[in-house]
Each structure stands twice: as structure tokens, then as C-alpha cells.
Amino acid sequence: MAQEEPDYDIFNDLDDYLTIVLEVNKYEQNTTSQFCNSISLNYSHNNQIIELCRKFVSFFNNLKSNYKSDSSPEDNKKYSEYLNFWVRHQLELQSISKTDKLVLYKHLQDNYQQLDEDSKLKNKLYNINDNDFKSMNMLYELYKNYNGPLSDYNDDCNNFLKKFKVNYDKCLYRCYAEGDSKLCAVMKKFRDLYDEKKFPRAQTCNASSQKLPKLSEYCTIEPTVSEDYNIGYQLVQTADTSIRYELPKLTEANHNELKDLIWLQYNMSFHYDEEKKKTYMMKVLYQFIFYCNENKKNLKLSLFMKEFIRKYYTTNEAEYKEIFTECEGKDNKEIYGQWYKNCKEKFGKDILLIRDNANSYVQQQENYIKELPTLDLLILKAKALFQDSESMSKYSTTIISIMISIFLCLFFLYKLTPLSSIFRKEKKRRKIPLFFPERSINDVKHDNSGNMKTKPKRGKIRFSYQPT
């Protein structure tokens, strides 16, 4: 039979499932579980598989009877899908081999009709592939943490929230950084559930807990031909040292928080402590401005700036303005206050532009590029195009045109400006007199034999003529 894609959104009623499953451990053998006894394996897991099969039957019967008596429509419940996940989860906990897993699933598929007259389990029993199970298990741990009582964490809100942060952030990274779009969709629903009622069984921790950050729409992380699509994602890749147009990669040394933010497609991880959240936000802003100043002469920097402001800063602008007001009004000794102070000292004009109107910060960068000297701009464009191997093939005509322009520019500079004098150094010629000065010839012999062995200077013989 064809295997269906697993549904990730099956944990809304997890609290009920976890309550009902407690009864499974008290199961009694009944006629509907007789088919489990016929499972036969050649390995030591035979008894474990048979026992798990019986628990499966008991769990299914309890779930079915529970939702038949429930006032909500049974069709809206996904206990069949959850039951399939539960089987896989139990197999993993018991370290059952893949071969034995498949034997159990085959046995359940062949015999489920003995207990399921309504065919609720039809096409719902199969071995979930490893990749999907990993994502579903992360969601299971997150919902379990959300619904769990505080007593599970020794009545300590700090431990409870730490565990919740770990589970929530794992799901975020799996979704946005690793590209699991199905998990992203469930995370959005979970956020709505959290906003509606935070921690129903750990309400004493609600006051100290922050809201979950708003989640952006998931976009594919695969590279595209568009130069301005998902630039941030290219900045955090490790394959090359730079992306198109020589934008350097973000490093952990100088841009750690900014890099993490972009890995999550501009979504913040969960911060249950207000001061830590504000510190994180100020670090992100500081590292962003620092990166922009490092790469001010890059022609495509403004594209990254626009993306950052559109996807992240605008969403969190109200919180940033609160931080700015708080840090300006008094001598803030909190860690985020020190980061604001450092940012203002090093990038005073930049942070003021962002505070007043973030788009004006981008406009400043675009104006800076436009105002560069023509020759500098041509060199930057040529350098950028040569750096991009894709553009070399697409823009070969443009490259040749730019090189010709540079050549003509240098030629006219040579011809029409004082620069020509540097290259036109005229060699001073030695003037040779037309007549040699008159000399006494008294000592000269008549046949001039005394000068026969005289070697001419520089290989030349010069004759002088003395008129009588």
C-alpha cells in the first residue's frame, strides 16, 4: 500500500492522550487483542513486540470510547494519526530494530479491522520515515512541555522555562534553518495556542514568561537566480567565503547573534527573561550596523539592509523604540544599556537614523554609492562582476563595455590633464657646436702621424675645418 505523508498537526489534544495512555499500562487481555499473540519473531524482541501490540489495542479502544462520549465532533480529532506516532515512539524507546518494526506494522495493517469496524485506522498505520519522525518528536516534546505540570520541574519556573526554550528553539531551527515547512506551519498554530493560554498547568510561571515572537512566513532556502532574494541566507552559508557581489559571510566572532537570527529567517528565538531579550536585540542591531560599516563600499549592501529592515526591524520596531527611550532617559546599567551606549559611541549617526526612520539609513547608503567618483564606481562594478562567475557569462558585454570605458577615461586623463607631463619627460639633448673653437696647431706634425693611434671617443670621429 502507498504510504501517506504524516500529519504533523496531531498534538493539540496531547494532554488528553497522555492522560488516557496511563490506562494502557493497566490493560487486560481481551478478544480484540488476540491477533497480537500470533506475532512471531526470530529475535529476542518477540515478547516486547507482542506486549506493545496489546497496548496499542487497549490505547485505541480507550481513545475511541473517549471521543464517542465527547461533545466535540469525532472527525475533528486526530487520535488515529497520533496512535501511529505513539507506536513509532514506543519502538524507538525500546530500541527495536527496523526489521522488527516492519513486522509489527505489517501485522497491524493485516489485522486492524478486528477492532476497528469504522475503519478509523485505514491507511494510518505505517512506519514513519526517520526525517518526519524527528520533526514530529520535537513537536511532541514541545507540546508535552507546554502541557506539563510544574511538579515535573521541582516547582521551579526557571527550570520549566529553560526546558521550554530548548524545545521551542529546536523546533525553530528545524523549521527555518533546516527547511521543514510542515513543521513551520504547526509552529504558527502552536504560537496561537500559547498566546491564547500560556502553560495551562504551570500558571504560576505565566507572569515571568515573555510572549512568543511573531513568526514569519517560511520561504525556501534554496538559492535562486534573483540577486535580491534571501540575501541573508547566503550570508550564513559556509560553502564559500563570499556571495554574489563580494558580500562577506557573517562570522561567529563578530556577528554571532545576527547570524543566528538570519539562520531562523529573521525570527527571534524564545527569551523568557526580559533583560536577556533586550540584550539580544541590541546585540543584533549593533552587529548589523557594524557589518554595514565594514562593507560600505559594496554595491549590493543596500539590498541586504532593505531585507533586514523589512523582515526584522520593522516587525520589532516598537520594542526597539522602548529600548531607545529607556536607555536615553537615564544612565542604564543593564547589559543592553551598555550595548546601546557602545552603539551610539561608535555609530552615533547611524543609530539615530535608524531610530528616526530606518529607511533613511538605507537611503544614506544608496546616496554614498551614487556620490562615489566615476572612476571608483567603474572599478567597483568591474570588480564585482569579475567576482561573480554567473555574471561573467550573463554580462560579458557589460564587462567589456566597462573595461573600454576605463581605458578611454585613462586615455583622456593622459591627454588632457597635467598627468601627461609625468609621462612626457623630454630628454635634454646635448648641443654640439657647429665649429670647434680655434686651437694652436704649432705642435701638430705635418703628416699628423702623432694622432694616428688616437682612439675616437664613443666610436665617432669628428673633423674640424679651419678656414685659411
Image: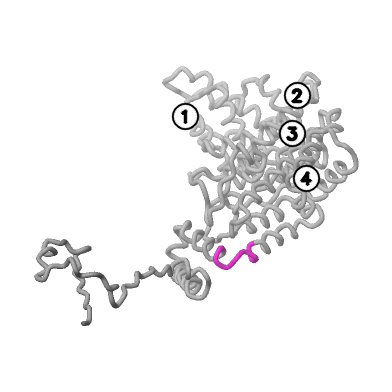
Asked which quadrant contains residue 178, the reply is top right
How far across and how far down the image is residue 241, in percent?
51, 46
From the image, tell me which residue sits under label 1: 98
- Residue under label 4: 344
The answer to whether the residues at label 2 and label 1 have Cβ atoms under 8 Å apart is no
Instruction: Tell me the magenta residue range.
Output: 369-376
Pointers 3 and 1 in contact (CB under 8 A)? no
What residue lies at 43% left-to-right and 19% top-to-bottom?
A: 43
* Residue 256 position (above or below residue 393): above
Question: Residue 228 appears in which quarter of the rendering?
Answer: bottom right
**Residue occupying the point 50% across, 31% down:** 107
Can you tell which of label 3 and label 2 is closer to the viewer? 2
Q: CA–CA distance between discs 3 and 1?
A: 32 Å
Tell me which residue sits at (80%, 46%) in the image.
320
Picture coordinates of residue 282, whole percent (x, y)? 75, 41
439 horizontally vs 253: left or right? left
Is residue 132 something one can see in this rendering? yes
Earlier in the chain: of badge 3 and badge 4, it is 3
Mark seen at residue 66: 3
Residue 57 is covered by the magenta coloring? no
Is residue 404 left or right of 206 when viewed as pictured? left
268 with respect to 447 (left or right): right
Q: Amino acid at mark 4?
A: Lys
- The Cα–Cα distance between marks 2 and 1, rounded to whole angstroms, is 36 Å
Disc 4 to disc 1, how far (Cα)? 59 Å
Q: Which mark is in front, 3 or 1? A: 1
Question: Could you tell which of marks 2 and 1 lies nearer the N-terminus?
Answer: 1
Mark 2: amino acid: Asn
